[in-house]
Image (cartoon, rainbow, N blue to C red):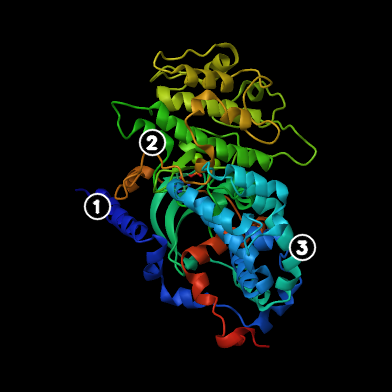
Amino acid sequence: MDMGGLETVVANSAYVSARGSIDSAAAATMRDKKYRTKLNLPHIRQCEHMKTTVDSSFDSMCVRQSIGKRLFQQYLESEPAHKNSVDLWKDIEDYNVAQENDRAKKAQKMVNKYYESSSKNFCDFLGDKAVSRVKEDYKNIRGDLFKESEKHQLLVQLEAKALNGFKDSMYFLRYVQFKWLESQPVTEDWFMDFRVLGKGGFGEVHACQMKATGKMYANKKLSKKRLKKRKGYDGAIIEKRILAKVHSRFIVTLAYAFQTKIDLCLVMTIMNGGDLRYHMYNVDEKNPGFNENRACYYMAQIICGLEHLHQHRFVYRDLKPENVLLDDIGHVRLSDLGLAVELPPGKDKTQGYAGTPGFMAPELLQKKEYDYTVDYFTLGVTLYEMVAAKGPFRCRGEQVDNNEVTRRILNDPVSYPPTFSQELKDLCEGLIEKDPEKRLGFKNNECAELKNQSFFKELNWGRLEAGMLPPPFVPDAKMVYAKDIDDVGAFSTIKGVVIDNKDNEFYNEFATGNVPIPWQEEMIETGVFGELNVWGQNGKLPNDLDP
Ligand code: ADP
Ligand code: MG
Ligand code: MG
C-alpha cells in the first residue's frame, strides 16, 4: 500500500470509530472533559440583565426552542392548575413519534383520559369540534390525529393562562441562564477535525466533533481569500442565512457559524451516507440508477425539503442528485444552498442565471423572471435521472456543450425509457413541463397537488414527514462514502489578495456563533442539558439561582 492509501485508511478509521460511538447515549464517553467543564451555567446575577432582552415570545420560547420548551413543561408540571395540560401535551408528543402498532392503544387511552367529559382529567378547553373529531377518528392510525387539539386549543390556552406565570418563575431564570450560555462565542478550538468528506468551490468539508458534547458535525470551510478573489461573499452569507433560518429534517441544519484566521466555517448536520449521485452511479456500476420504489422515497423527502424552503420564500435553484445527501440511516436532506435566493416580501419573482446545465428550467434559461417553479423543473430532471441513470436531455455517456443542452431544454420533447411505469412518466411529464404555468409544484403555500400524484399512492406522507418511514436503503456504518484523501484534490494557492477592514466587517457579520434551536437540541440530545439543569432539594432554590 502506498503512503497516500495508508493516510486514507488511518483517517477513515478515526472517523468511523468517532462516528460509531456517537449514538447520543455514548456521546458522553467521547467528550473532552476540559471543554465540557467550560459549558457551565452562570450565576443568575451574571445574566439577569438578559431577562428583558431574551427571546420570550410564546411560540419561540415555549414551543420551538427545545430547552425553552423543556423548562416551560417543567414549570407546568410544578403547577397543579396546569398538570392536566402538560400531561396531554406530552402524551400527544409521545403519540406523534410512536410506532404505528402502538398508536391505537395510546390513542384509546388518551381519548378516555382527556376527551371524555366524564373523566376527571377531561380537558374542557379542547372545544367540541376537536373533541368530536378525535373521538370519531382515533381508530384510524394517523400522524396528525391530535394536531388540531395541540395547535389550536392546547397551546392557545397555555399562552393565555401560563405564559406570565412561567416568566415569573425560577424556570424562566434557568432559561435565561441557558440563553446566556448559548450566546457565548464559539471558536475553532471547540471542534476536533476528522477526515475530509468532500471538496467545495471555496474549501474542504471535514467531519468534526464538538469537543464539549461529543456530537459529530460537518464543517464546511470557506477560504477567506478564495471567497474574496472569486466574489463569493454574497453566496456565502445567503447560504448561512438560509441554513440558520430553516429547520427541517429534510434540509441540512446549521448549528454554528464562526471564523478562523483563514476560513469562514459552517458547522452543520453531518451526512455520512454520501450523495445520491454517488449511489446512483458508483455503488453498482453495472446497474446504475434506482428502482422506482427507492426513487419514490427520495422524491418524497426532497419534496418536503423544497416545500419548506418555498414556505420560507427561498428558491433553491440547484437541486440535483449531487446536492442531496444521505445520513447514517438513509434519510436524505437537501444541501449546498449557496445558489438560493430569497423572494423579499411583496415581490414574487426573481431573475438571474443560476443552476447546473441540464437541470435549469426554460424560463430561467430565457432570462425571464421566475419563482419557485424552477425548482420543480429541476425536481423532474432529478427524478428522471434517478431512474433512467441519465439526464432527460443527454444520452448516456454523451459529451454535449451547454448551448446544445439549452437548445434541447427549450425545444425538444423528452423521451421516456420503456421501463418507466405510467405513474412515473406522468409525474416526470408534469414536472419537466416547459411552461411554468402548467408545471406541477407549489400552490397555495403547499405541495398538496404534487403529493397526491398517483406515483405516490402507496406512500404514507404523515409518517414520512415525522421521520418514521424506514428508508429503502441503509448505508453501511463501516463504509466511508467519500473519496480517498488523495483524490479529493488540492486547492491552488491564492495570491495577491489582501484582507482589509471592510472584509473583516463582513466576516464578523457572518460569524454569528451558535444557532439557538440546533444548539439546544445538541445540549439535550447529548445529555448536557440534563446535567446542568439541576434543582435544589425540597423546593429550595439551587445555588446558582439564589440571589
Ligand atoms: P460547494 O457549495 O462549494 O459546492 P458543498 O456544500 O457542495 O460545497 O460541499 C462540498 C462537498 O462536501 C459535497 O459535495 C459533499 O461531498 C461534502 N459535504 C457537504 N456538506 C456535507 C455534509 N453536511 N455532510 C457530509 N458531507 C458534506
Ligand atoms: Mg456543491
Ligand atoms: Mg454551493
| Closer-to-camera residue (70/254) | 70
Q: Nearer the viewer, mark 3 or mark 1?
A: 3
List the single residue furthest toward the left. Answer: 1
Can you tell which mark lies on residue 6? 1
Is residue 260 visible to the viewer in this orientation of the structure?
no
Please provide percent x and percent y for residue 532. 53, 76
Is residue 341 positioned above or below 353 on the image?
A: below
Q: Residue at x 48, y 21 (%)?
A: 424
Label 3 secondary element: helix
Q: Secondary structure at mark 2?
A: helix
Q: Which label number is shown at residue 160?
A: 3
Q: Residues within 10 Å of mark 2 (few under 14, many from 20)?
A: some
- Disc 1 is placed on an element classified as helix
- In the rendering, at what x and y percent does residue 436 appear? 66, 22
The numbered mark, 2 or 3, whose residue comes first in the sequence reads 3
Kind of residue at disc 2: Tyr
Separation of residues labelled 2 and 1 (CA atoms):
23 Å
